[in-house]
Image: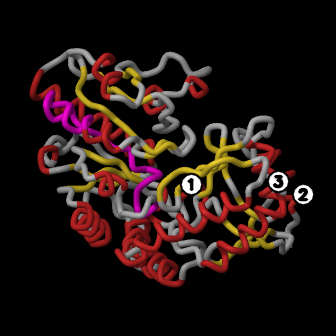
Amino acid sequence: MVTFEELKKLDSQYVVQSYGRSPIAIDHGQGATLYGVDGKEYIDFASGIGVLSVGTADPEWQAAVAGQAGKLAHISNLYYSEPYIRLAEKLCTRSGMAAAFFGNSGAEGNEGIIKLARKYSWEKYGEGRGTVITLNRSFHGRTITTLAATGQDVFHKYFFPFTEGFRWADPSIDSVRQTAGDDVCAVLVELVQGEGGVLPLDPGFVHDLAKLCADRDWLFLVDEVQTGIGRTGSLFCFQQYGVQPDAASFAKGIAGGLPMGGFLVNEKCRHVFTPGDHASTFGGNPVAAAAANAVLDILDDESISRVKEKGEYLRAAIESMDLPCLGKTRGMGLMIGVEVSEGFSNKELCAKLNQAGLLSLTAGSGLRFLPPLTITKEELDKGLVILKAALS
C-alpha cells in the first residue's frame, strides 16, 4: 500500500499548492469513522466541510450511485433525464419553493441567484438597479463575483478588479437601510454565517429584512450552501426562521460527496430565466442527481429532527468539559462553532485534534464542527473523548 510520505511527495510535485493540508491521508471509512493510509482511525467532525451529509460509504447512497453510473452517467441539459426531475420535485415539495436549477458548486449556486436578481430587476425597472447588499463577515464563494459578494477583507487580496455591484452592511436593519440606495436589487445573506465564525443571524432581524425586501421589491436571497440539506435541523435553515426567500442556493451536503449545487426559486421568480439566460454543462448530472435523491431519502423528516438533538448533545458535552482553551459554543443543529480562549490559536488547536484522531475545522477565530448528520452517539462519544484528551 502507498505510504503517506509517497503521497505527499507526489502531491508536492504534481498538484498546485493552494491548500494548507493537514499531514493526514485518508484511505476509506464507514459512517463518521475514517481510516488513514497507515490504518489510523479518525472520527469525522468535519464531513469534508459539510459535504458528507450521510457519512462515508452509506449503503443506500452507494447503490444509487453505482446503479446510475452503470445506466447513464451524463446526457447534458439538451435532453431530459429522470434523476434531476425527481430531485427537483423532492426539493420543491419539502421546501415550499417552486422550481430548481442545478449546477456543480456553492459558488455557482450563488452566482446564479445574483444573476437572477439582476435580471428580475432589469426587466421590471430597467438599467441602474443591480446592486446586491451582503453582510459583513459573510462568505459566498471563491469565484471573482462571489468573492466580491463576500464581506471579509481577508479574502479581498490579489485578485482585483472584482465584479462591481456589491455593498456590505452589518446584520441590523438600520445598517441595511443606511447601506441601501436606489440602485439595490437584492439582499443576500447566510442565516448562519459559516466561514465568519458560525454566527446565527437574529430572527427579528431576518424577519425585518424579509419585510424590507418585500416592501422595496428587492429579491430576498438566502445562501444555504452550508446550512442547507438538514445541517441546522431542518431541510433548509430558512424553514426554522419562518421566512420564504425569493431564491436560495444549496450545495455541499446535497449529493453526499459528489459535486452538486444549485438554487431554488419561489413562484415570483419561477419564470425570470428563459432558455439561454443561464446554464451549466454538468448541472443535473444523472449520477450526482441519483446520489442527491438517495441523500434526501435517507434524510427524511425523522432523521433531520434528530440533528437538533445530536447538536444539543455535542454542544452540552463540550461546554461541560470546561477546557481552559475553549469558551462557549454556538450554532444550529450540527453546525457548531466553539469559541477559542484568548492566548490560544484555533489553527493550532485544530491541528492537535486532527493529529489526535478527530477531524476538525476552523471558522473565524474559533473551531467549527460539522459531523455527518447520520453520526451515531457512539461516534459522537468517541470524538468527545479525543477532544478532551487532546485539549486538556
Q: Earlier in the sequence, mark 3 or mark 2?
A: 2
**Residue at 60% over, 63% down:** 316
Which x, y percent locates residue 187?
Answer: 30, 32
Q: Which residues make up the magenta segment?
A: 208-231
Rounded to the nearest angstrom, the CA distance separating label 3 from label 2 is: 20 Å
In the rendered image, the vertical position of residue 365 relative to residue 249, given as above or below: above
| Nearer the camera: disc 3 or disc 2 | 3
Image-quadrant location for residue 233: bottom left
Q: Is residue 86 magenta?
A: no
The dot on residue 5 is 2
Of the 4 image quadrants, the one containing the C terminus is bottom right
Image label count: 3
Image-quadrant location for residue 93: bottom left
Rounded to the nearest angstrom, the CA distance separating label 3 from label 1 is: 18 Å
The dot on residue 212 is none
Secondary element type, mark 3: helix
The one of 129 and 243 positioned closer to us in this rendering? 243
For the residue marked with disc 1, what is the amino acid? Ile
Which x, y percent locates residue 86?
Answer: 27, 71
Q: Is residue 46 left or right of residue 301?
A: right
For the residue marked with disc 3, what is the amino acid? Lys
Q: Is residue 212 magenta?
A: yes
Of the 4 image quadrants, the one containing the N terminus is bottom right
Q: What residue sits right under mark 3 in the picture? A: 352
The crowd level at tag 3 (other Cα within 10 Å; few <14, some 14-19, many 20+) is: some
In the rendered image, the vertical position of residue 18 relative to residue 122, given as above or below: below
**Residue at 40% over, 31% down:** 171
Secondary element type, mark 2: helix
The dot on residue 336 is 1
Rounded to the nearest angstrom, the CA distance separating label 2 from label 1 is: 33 Å
